Image (spheres, rainbow, N blue to C red):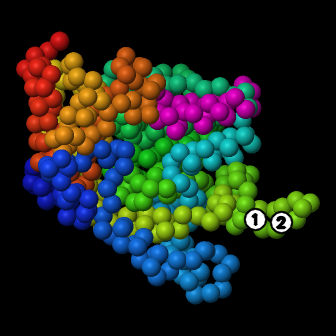
Amino acid sequence: MNARTDARQLALAGDFPILARPIHGRRLAYLDNGATTQKPDAVIEAERRFYRESNANIHRGVHRLSQEATELYDVARESVRRLLNARAAEEIVFTRGTTEAINLVAASWGRANLKAGDEILLTALEHHSNIVPWQLLCEQTGATIRVVPVSDAGELELAAFEQLLGERTRLLAITQVSNALGTINPVAELTAKAHAAGAIVLIDGAQAVAHQTVDVQAIGCDFYAFSGHKLYGPTGIGALYGRAELLAAMPPWQGGGDMIRTVAFEGSSFAEPPQRFEAGTPNIAGAVGLAAAIDYVQAIGLERIAAHEHALLERATAAVGDIPGVRLIGTARHKASILSFLVDRIHPHDLGTILDAEGVAIRAGHHCAMPLMTRFGIPGTARASFALYNDEADVDALVAAIHKGQDLFGTRGTTR
């Protein structure tokens, strides 16, 4: 099956009601999937059904609705375990998303284990959510951050990684897929090297789980974080995978109901993981919706989704890259379905506005990756990111809209 045929056959826009909505009187080409994905009917219906039929608070309730809600929440945790191939459901902590998951590790594991002189190894590809929590932790503990640089293509400088990795490295925190460039990092290889140096490894999987199969046991990482809303699930729900022995040794990071064993004014004792890290009433409906999203993508097949998106990325890279006056930012050999670019003499925000008028939704700006933009000497990029429901018509609409922008600015067919 060739790429063009595969791209047509996988497009499932009919499952996503919002994609039928015209934008400015035009067919919507939604290419902002790196920021958030649209939701299929299966996810919308799962949340609706929970609130209509099973809404109650979980745990400890003896009535029927509470028991049903608890069972649905437990099933959702098992769905995440299966998605990541964790060893046990107890290794899955529900969070609001990747950001909260990383902050949880920083606040709990980090405060308990880091001290002055220790080093945290990051990369120039990181999202702010995998930078700022570690900066705050360093201010509190006296640890320091070191950064692995990237090449002009947007690939990690692996020789520099090995030089920076040393006996003081306590933590490697790294994205699996760059949200700004689409670069896919060799996380299993880097995890093995970090472990050999005695470091713990956290992986930001926000841009990975919707685009490829993830196996935390095969990767060997200690922590893995992702967000449901980038996986066709609801906003406000995500998960942290943590190795059981690490979670068991970590102190709570928030106090409240449902994370305790006993409470007295003289002191409290705490529940075992994962409940220890889920204080208060959780996003039960969000977990139910996330489980529905996982079922949806697994029924299609993540390998099939990856092949479809790769075909679209290749088509878009060739078509956009051939436009005079366009500069591609991020040309790594191994990429997920993200295309960042600049158009001569058109600011990315202006280009985004022009594309919106043509029904094409992209992201424009620094993509919460300001250090990476500084590395390339630019304030930001225009970013098109593809999902399972996109098709060749969306790529063609993107190209036509870029031409429209150049026509409006009088730059079509010219370079600086």
132 lies above or below 256: above
Q: Position of residue 216 (x, y in %)?
A: 49, 53
* CA neighbours of label 2 inside 10 A, class few (<14), some (14 to 19), many (20+): few
Q: Amino acid at mark 1?
A: Ile
| Picture quadrant where residue 158 is located | top left
Which residue is at a point 36% across and 72% down the rendered structure image? 45
Number of callouts: 2
Secondary element under disc 2, as helix, strand or loop, is strand
Which residue is at a point 68% across and 43% down the rendered structure image? 107
- Asked if labels 1 and 2 touch by Cβ distance under 8 angstroms, the answer is yes
- Nearer-the-camera pick, 195 or 407: 407
Quarter of the image where the C terminus is located: top left
Residue position marked by numbered label 2 in the rendering: 263
Q: Amino acid at mark 2?
A: Val
Task: Using the rendered image of the protein, determine whether residue 192 is visible from the camera's viewpoint.
Answer: no
Q: Which mark is residue 96?
A: none
Q: Position of residue 372 (x, y in %)?
A: 42, 25
- Nearer-the-camera pick, 67 or 202: 67
Which residue is at a point 32% across and 33% down the rendered structure image? 364
Residue 139 highlighted magenta (yes or no) = yes
Residue position marked by numbered label 1 in the rendering: 260
| Picture quadrant where residue 411 is located | top left
- Nearer-the-camera pick, 370 or 305: 370
Secondary element under disc 1, as helix, strand or loop, is strand
Q: Position of residue 22 (x, y in %)?
A: 18, 54
- Nearer-the-camera pick, 41 or 337: 41
Quarter of the image where the N terminus is located: bottom left
Which residue is at a point 23% across and 30% down the rendered structure image? 351
Q: Is residue 103 left or right of residue 412?
A: right
Write the start and end of the magenta stretch as one range: 115-140
134 lies above or below 152: below
Q: Is residue 319 left or right of residue 266?
A: left
